[in-house]
Image (spheres, rainbow, N blue to C red):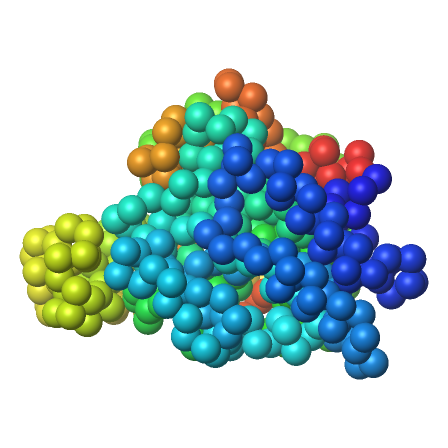
Amino acid sequence: MEPWQLTATAARARLQEGTLTAEALVRSCLERIAARETVVKAWNFLDPALAIASAREVDKAYVRGVLHGLPIGVKDMIDTADMPTTHNSPIYQGLRQGRDAACVGIARGEGAVILGKTDTVEFAASGRRALTRNPHDPTRTPGGSSSGSAAAVADGMVPLAFGTQTGGSLIRPASFCGVYGMKPTHGVVNSEGAKRYSHTLDTIGWYGREPADLRLLAEAFRLFDLDRPLGKGLQQLRIGLCRGPNWHLAQPESQAALLIAGQRLEAAGVAVEELSLPQRFEGITEAQRIILLGEGRGAFLQEYVTAHARLHADFRDRVENVAEITGARMACAYDLAAECRKLFDALFPAFDAVLTPACTGEAPVGRQDTGNPVFNSMWTLLHVPCIGIPCTKGPNGLPVGVQIVGPRFGDAALLDVAALVAPVIDPGLALE
């Protein structure tokens, strides 16, 4: 097995044992990128010499953090001191901020090697699509907006990568690319230094190839209650199977994935119970859309004023309020979100997690359609943690995932649940 094939957790073990160096791991990842990047196109910026030099410095370090020696890809709307941050926008080509975003600085401080910048949908929002292709089928999208991060982890180019989610930008690409993804509770990871789209919704998260990989970054970010284990075995779990208010929009393969995941858990002795959300949740998807568009007006106003001709029409429409969002509609959306957050949290601890679709189906053909975020946006607005888990293959042989969701600040417990249920839901993981 080549080092690039290792999960982050397996690589970390070898790094700790001294049987692998950060430089050797980075060089292996770079070799994989050299072999596959012309097909996958996951990276906006890559400087092999810089990555190798960074790895050598990490290898010399006496103090070793939780991410020591692990290469990480960074979505190209998150600032990096030694690399450009373009936001995939013509306005910011070649721009170097000269400072790290908080999440990047923390990762470096814990010993990570920043490998490069991964492609993204413009401003992690709309406009220009990433050039990235789905590594399972280059004629299809990897999803968006965290396109390059999901594809790079899926293709073995890097064991970990940062993404963001404002609607469905992290969990949906995880499903399309067949990797694990975590969107933590809103606000627990400092988003300073990442392009703002919606302060109510923007959340920094990450990708890995198994639940233990996700936990490494959770430890780096000191998420709440990681020192309090769930204290349950697989057969003591209670899982709520939730189709959600948008079930009618799920394609047959996504509906099948959810039901198959539930059946696999039941066969393993897990208590799985159908869960219907209160009627108030019927309006939560529209509330997310209103808040997204309303807060987006201010997010892109600076570019609208200073670089109008180079700003994509999608963002000009937001600033010009083509969607006709009013203050009254914003207030109602905020109020509904606050109400539904309490209603959802009240479902716990009767359940240990909620199992729900991660996407509408397989990855669409082409780059323009990055998929419908309808099975993600409500959870983003509710501020709850989500973990995407690969599950089945669709009619075209492409990955289709599911996600588990917990209450706000239940990230640690959700990671424990993921470690228990993932080998059951994702048979490929159990075989590794």
Q: Is residue 272 left or right of residue 5?
A: left
Residue 14 location (% of width, % of height) = 87, 57
Identity of the residue drawn at 80% across and 70% down: 59
Query: Looking at the figure, which quarter contains the N terminus?
Result: top right
Q: Quadrant of residue 301?
A: bottom left
On screen, residue 224 above or below 308 = below
The image position of residue 328, as x and y in percent, is 11, 68
Query: In this view of the protein, which residue sits in the foreground, 422 or 319?
Result: 319
The answer to which quarter of the image holds residue 316 is bottom left
Foreground residue among 386 and 170: 170
As drawn, the residue found furthest toward the bottom would be 63
Q: Position of residue 140 (x, y in %)?
A: 44, 29
Residue 125: in sight, yes or no?
no
| Residue found farthest to the front | 49
* Farthest-out residue, top: 395
Number of dots carrying numbers? 0
Identify the residue shown where x is 33% and y is 44%: 129
Q: Is residue 360 above or below residue 216?
A: above
Quarter containing the C terminus: top right
Query: Residue drawn at (77%, 62%), measured in percent from left and top?
Result: 22
Indicate left or right for 310 with 196 as reference. left
x, y percent for residue 206: 56, 58
362 or 38: which is nearer to us?
38
